[in-house]
Amino acid sequence: MITWEFIIGHLNYWFFIVLMMTGLYIVIAKGNLVKKVVGLNIFQTSVFMFYISIGKVIGGTAPIFPMDMKINNDVVYSNPLPHVLILTAIVVGIATTSLALALIVRIREEYGTIEEDEIFIIEQELDFSNTRSNTDKPIGHF
Amino acid sequence: MLSGVFSLLSALLLITLDAVDVAFTEAAVGAGISIVLMLSTLTLTSRREKKSKNSNLIPLVIVTLTGLVLIYGTLDMPNFGAADTPSQIHVAREYIKRTPEDIHIPNIVTAILGSYRGYDTLGETAVIFTAGIGVLLILGRLSLRPRRRTKKIEKVL
């Protein structure tokens, strides 16, 4: 069942999945928040390439007619729908990236670090000091 | 920065896959704006990454498993570049056929983006607008920042 043709025809999907998993690995394993955003970007771009590769027709050309609009019906065009979808997705992607980077700058202002584990430690200490100051109050207070 | 090189290479790949409009956008947005934003963030925060003490084993296992499941999912997919796949013979042909009569412009991608699916593009601009407002509220002077916790954090440090 698994022929040479099958492997060649699916190799592009597998490459994009490997790239996607590289991005996912960066998101999970790295503690630096900027690196996490870079990983998300790699993940995103590999999904884009995956979609575009679905729309490709071998022997086809870019979905643009000649300028004089003399359309030759023998010309094969690649599927324009994934292109439209991915154009929208790229622009939305930059919007979310910029929002994430703004949040990182803000986190840095507040915590003085952009490392995940350090932020976690600070949060724990804050919670601990909060509970301690609450229990320090005399019980007959209210 | 390597991320910009990656964006540029992916734009070249998109050109070979016949998606010239997408390649333009990726080169402008991915290799241009996104790198400027990334570099300015790095300038505002810190340049060096600190070594993480967590082990890399668990993420590696998760990633490998997810990748295998995804590859299993592709086994039912049609071969690359085949012309008789569901995605090619459904509505896509209809768009290609009707664009010259309906819209009278040569670029099919632009025709779909601006006219057939114009509401999607409107939604896209709404998303960008929201993100811009969000960035302004987070970083700008307009923001109502509660500064209460900062002193406490300094005490902890």
Image (tube, coloured by chain):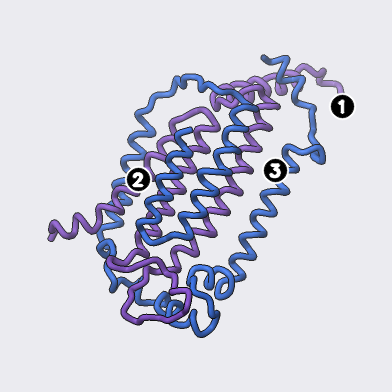
Chain colours: A purple, B blue
Answer left or right for A116 relative to A3: right
> Image height check: is B115 above or below B39?
below
Q: Which mark is residue B135?
A: 3
* Residue A16 coordinates in the image, percent (x, y): 34, 49
* Residue B77 coordinates in the image, percent (x, y): 28, 62
Mark 2 Cα shell of 10 Å, populated few (<14), some (14-19), many (≥20): some
* Residue B9 coordinates in the image, percent (x, y): 40, 45
Which of label 3 and label 1 is nearer to you? 3
Give the residue type that dot 3 points to. Answer: Val
Give the residue type that dot 1 points to. Answer: Phe
Quarter of the image with the C terminus of chain B in it: top right
Q: Secondary structure at mark 2?
A: helix
> Image height check: is A66 above or below A98?
below
Name the quadrant containing residue B90: bottom left
User: Which residue does the numbered mark 2 point to in the structure image?
Assistant: B66
Q: Chain of mark 2?
A: B
Residue placed farthest to the bottom in the image?
B101
Mark 3 Cα shell of 10 Å, populated few (<14), some (14-19), many (≥20): many
Give the residue type that dot 2 points to. Answer: Thr
Residue in the picture at 31% in, 50% down: B69
Which of label 3 and label 2 is nearer to you? 3
Q: CA distance from mark 3 to mark 2?
A: 33 Å
